[in-house]
Amino acid sequence: MKMTKASKTPKGAKRSTIHDVVTREYTVHLHKHIHGRSFKKRAPHAIKSIKFFAQMMMGTKDVRLDPGLNKQIWSKGVKTIQHRIRIRCARKRNDDEDAKEKLYTYVTYVPVTSFKNLESQVVDE
């Protein structure tokens, strides 16, 4: 039986999703995604950028944003978006029987006073 390099489980064996449930905090540099974007499309593009970032970091196609994060992005209007934002990405199990994906990512806003010396970190819940 062959062993895969990444998972260390025999090929064809089912992996448990319990080990894949994790929560991490990231700082997203929104300014580089928004720069040059027309004013009326900045906030919607910021939302799409955060979804894409979470999808890449957590490896799930299903990304759900917290309403508090949405309010924070839209707080200054469609045009003025803050340069950086701190988010918490939680990879969770999907409890729906008819769901396509076993896992989804739930993204929430983390208020911080300063972005200096912040790194990506795993959060214990």
Image: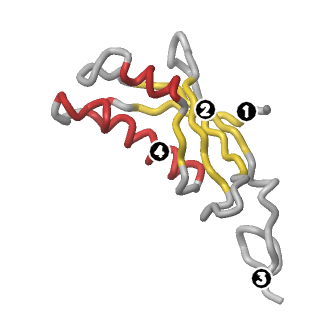
Q: Reply above or below: 104 against 5.
A: above
Residue 29, image x, y percentages: 41, 32
All told, the count of numbered labels is 4
C-alpha span from label 2 to label 4: 12 Å
Q: Are the residues tagged 1 and 2 within 8 Å (C-beta)?
A: yes
Q: Is residue 31 above or below residue 116?
A: below
- Say whether disc 3 or disc 1 marks the residue closer to the N-terminus: 3
Tell me the SS state at disc 4: helix
Residue 53 numbered mark, or none: 4
Q: Position of residue 15 (x, y in %)?
A: 79, 68
- Badge 4 crowding class, 10 Å Cα cut-off, few under 14, some 14 to 19, many 20 or more, is some
- 111 relative to 70 in the view: left or right: right
Residue tagged 3? 12
Q: Marks 4 and 1, how far apart in space?
A: 18 Å
Q: Quadrant of the N terminus?
A: bottom right
Residue on which the image places disc 2 = 88
* Quarter of the C terminus within the rendering: top right
Q: Residue at x 47, y 45 (%)?
A: 53
For marks 4 and 1, the one nearer the N-term is: 4
**Identity of the residue drawn at 54% across and 42% down:** 64
Helix, strand or loop for disc 3? loop
**Other-residue count near label 2 (Cα within 10 Å), few / some / many at <14 / 14–19 / ≥20:** many
Residue highlighted by disc 1: 123
Instruction: Give the mark nearer the N terminus: 1 vs 2.
Output: 2
Residue 66 drawn at (x, y percent): 55, 31
Q: Report the Cα–Cα distance between label 2 and label 3.
A: 33 Å
Q: Are marks 2 and 3 in contact (CB under 8 Å)?
A: no
Horizontal placement of 53 versus 15: left or right? left
